[in-house]
Structures are given as structure tokens and as C-alpha cells.
Image (spheres, grey):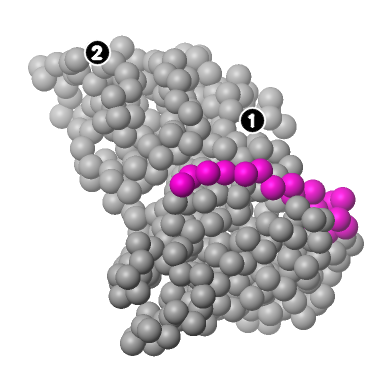
Amino acid sequence: MRAAQGAAAARWFRDCYGSDPAGVWHAPGRVNLIGEHTDYNEGYVLPFALAQGVRAAAGRRDDGVLELCSRQAPGAPVRVEVGSPTPGGVPEDAAPADLLRLTPGGVPGWAGYAAGVAWSLREAGHAVGGARVAIDADLPPGAGLSSSAALECAIAVALTGLYQVAIAPSELARLARRAENDFVGVPTGIMDQSASLECTRGHALLLDCRSLATAQVPLDLAAAGAELLVLDTRARHEHAGGSYTSRRRACEQAAALLGVPALRDVTDLAQLDRLPDPVLRRRARHVVADNQRVLEVTGLLRSGNVAEVGPLLTESHRSLRDDFEVSWPQADAAVDAATAAGALGARMMGGGFGGSVIVLVAAGRAARVVAAVGAEYDRRNWPAPALVPAAAEAGAYLMT
């Protein structure tokens, strides 16, 4: 499968540019097992990398231009002036009118995430320059599986690979996040980029979003007689909406009122009684409780008690639905139908307002649970949810 995907990406590069790429790099999407909206509150998260992701076939250009094409976004390649590794760039008399400038907010659409990585690397003093990049992906966009971070990380490993720039994965994750935060303008945390770059096969990644310390947590569900399903509800997810930003601001406001640097520093739910606004109390209660659930789930996985993870997933969903208020009708229906059909637990995943649901089932029960969710969707005249294969795979790597 990997060889075929790498070869397909290389062919796509030839279709775009008429030559062979120097290499093909892959960065995966991720599933977050538990810990939602805790990352930007400097808390804990527990993601794992998927087999599915974004592939960047790439070759160097010596004229300081980053040229981008995507199989998933047909059209003429996007061309951005990034500059050469040494001082200089595209001579003004040689720059065509349609050449975009590498400035925050200056590259629209999906290409902004890619160009932002080049900007972030150069802002940090790393000598990367122009390149031709052809993007291919098998992550459904808007499904809450971190397609944007996978794109950023694929570009990051491609550019650093092309220019032989050695950067530790944790630092590269920080730079990729900066591309999303400061270049594109989306205020996400660092979980997605860390998962895409630092996960190992067969493990979830326990990430402390304050210190950025990580630990690999065994995630051998098959050995425990369990299976994790990811159901794309087909309700499209969009991070850049104002609702996500408002939740983040509410968390910051709650922390300020409580006199702590971040909600990560609240360990006793009783402390939240000091918040006068009931909405702020609910928002903070979710973050504090989900942080605790991440640590509980980590302990259960390390001890092999996988079945006991299920109720914590469902608790997290109710918290996201009722306290953080970021769930959506298709997610709630999927969770209710799955648990009624015997799932060990289920919850919405991602920032909210669309995307995917994860469902933990005992071995041999997956078909029954998926059928129950499908029947509920059919009853409501919704498109059937799509089943996305979910296995804990490795982070970004050079394919060919």
C-alpha cells in the first residue's frame, strides 16, 4: 500500500511539472482518543496517527518560488515567492504578476497552510528555499482528522528533507503550528502537528501541551479484544469559524478569573464555583474534567484495561455536548445509537461543529454497531456515515 501510494504521488508530480520528484514524504492524519479542547489550555491529549494522510512529492527550485498543486484541489499551480536559502529572492523584473508574496494572510485557501510552513521555517532562521510540490491525500477534509495539520507536516518534512535541514520532530511541530496560528490565522493548539510528527506505530501519544513532553502509550486494542471505529458523520468541520475562537477565549477568561496561567492548573472542580458566569463554569468544567480523563485513560491502557476506557469516552462526549456545547446532531445520534447497540463507549472528536465520532467496541461487534448507526441516520434522512479505518501508525516519514 505505501509503495503504491508513493508511486501515485510521484506520478502526480510528473503530471503537474513534467519531471520526477526528488522524494515523496508522507504525514498522517490523527485520531484523538481523548482530551478535546485541552491542548490550547496547556493540558493533556492522547492522539494516535492514522495510516491515511497527506503525501508531498517534491523537488527543489533554485529561483526562490514555492509552486504548489493538489490532486484534491484541481486548478493551476499556486506560486509563492519564498526566497532562496541565501539572501535574495525572485528578481522584481522576473516576478510575474500572479506570484503571491510570503506574508501572513497573503496566500488564500489550502495553499496558505503549505506556504505558511515555508514562512515559519524561514522566520526561524532555517535555510529553505523554493520547491515544486505536488500534494495527494486520502484524508476526508472536514472530518476532524486533522487534514490541515497533515498538510503542514508533509510540507515541513519535504522542505527540510530537500534542503537537508535537521530539526527535531517536537520543534518541527511547533513551527508547523506557527504556520497555522500566525500565517493562516487559525488559533489551534499543538496536538495535531505533534501527533503527525511524533507518533509511533501501535501507540498513542500522551502529550503534555505545556512542556511538550511526550510518552508513547501502548494501544494494542486487538490484543485486548477491542476495536476502535471512526465514523465520518459527513457534517463538515471548519476550524476557522467564530465558535471555536469564542470557546478558546472563554477558557482564557475563566483562567484569568481563577488567577491561574491556564485551566490546566485547575485540578479540583470545586474551584470552578468561584466563576460567577455559569457559561464560563461549564466551559472550564469540561476542560478540567477532560484533562483528568486523559490521565485515567492512559493508566487504563498501560494496565491493559481497555474495556474500561469506553465509559470515559461517553463521559467526554456528554461533557463536550452539554458543557462545551460543540457537538452537532449527527454526532449525538451516532453516539446514542452506538451505545444502545452495545458499544463500550463513543464520543465526538475534534474541535466540534462537524467531523467524526469514535466508537470503542468489543471484537466482533463492529458490524452490529455500524448498522445501528446507519439505521438511525437513514431514519433521519441523513447520508450514511463513512467508516474510516483506524489503526495506530507511525508519524511522518520519507516514502521514496
Measured along the vertical axis of the image, is residue 329 above or below residue 220?
below
Which residue occupies 50% across, 25% down? Answer: 57
Which residue is under mark 1? Answer: 5
Crowding around mark 1 (Cα neighbors within 10 Å: few <14, some 14 to 19, many 20+) is some
Q: Name the residue type under label 1.
A: Gln
Which residue occupies 31% across, 12% down? Answer: 62
Q: Position of residue 224 (x, y in %)?
A: 86, 55
Q: Position of residue 225 (x, y in %)?
A: 88, 57
Q: Which quadrant: the C terminus? A: top right
Nearer the observer, 372 or 251: 251
Nearer the observer, 385 or 349: 349
Residue 155 at least partly seen: no
Q: Position of residue 380 (x, y in %)?
A: 63, 81
Residue 300 horizontal side relative to residue 385, left or right? right
**Which stretch appears magenta?**
211-228
Nearer the observer, 227 or 250: 250
Task: Kindly indicate the quadrant of the structure image that contains residue 86.
Answer: top left
As for residue 80 lying within the magenta part, the answer is: no
Residue 176 horizontal side relative to residue 25, left or right? left
Q: Position of residue 336 (x, y in %)?
A: 69, 80
Which residue is under mark 2? Answer: 86
Q: What element carries label 1?
A: helix
C-alpha gap between disc 1 and disc 2? 34 Å
Q: Name the residue type under label 2.
A: Thr
Which residue occupies 60% across, 72% down? Answer: 316
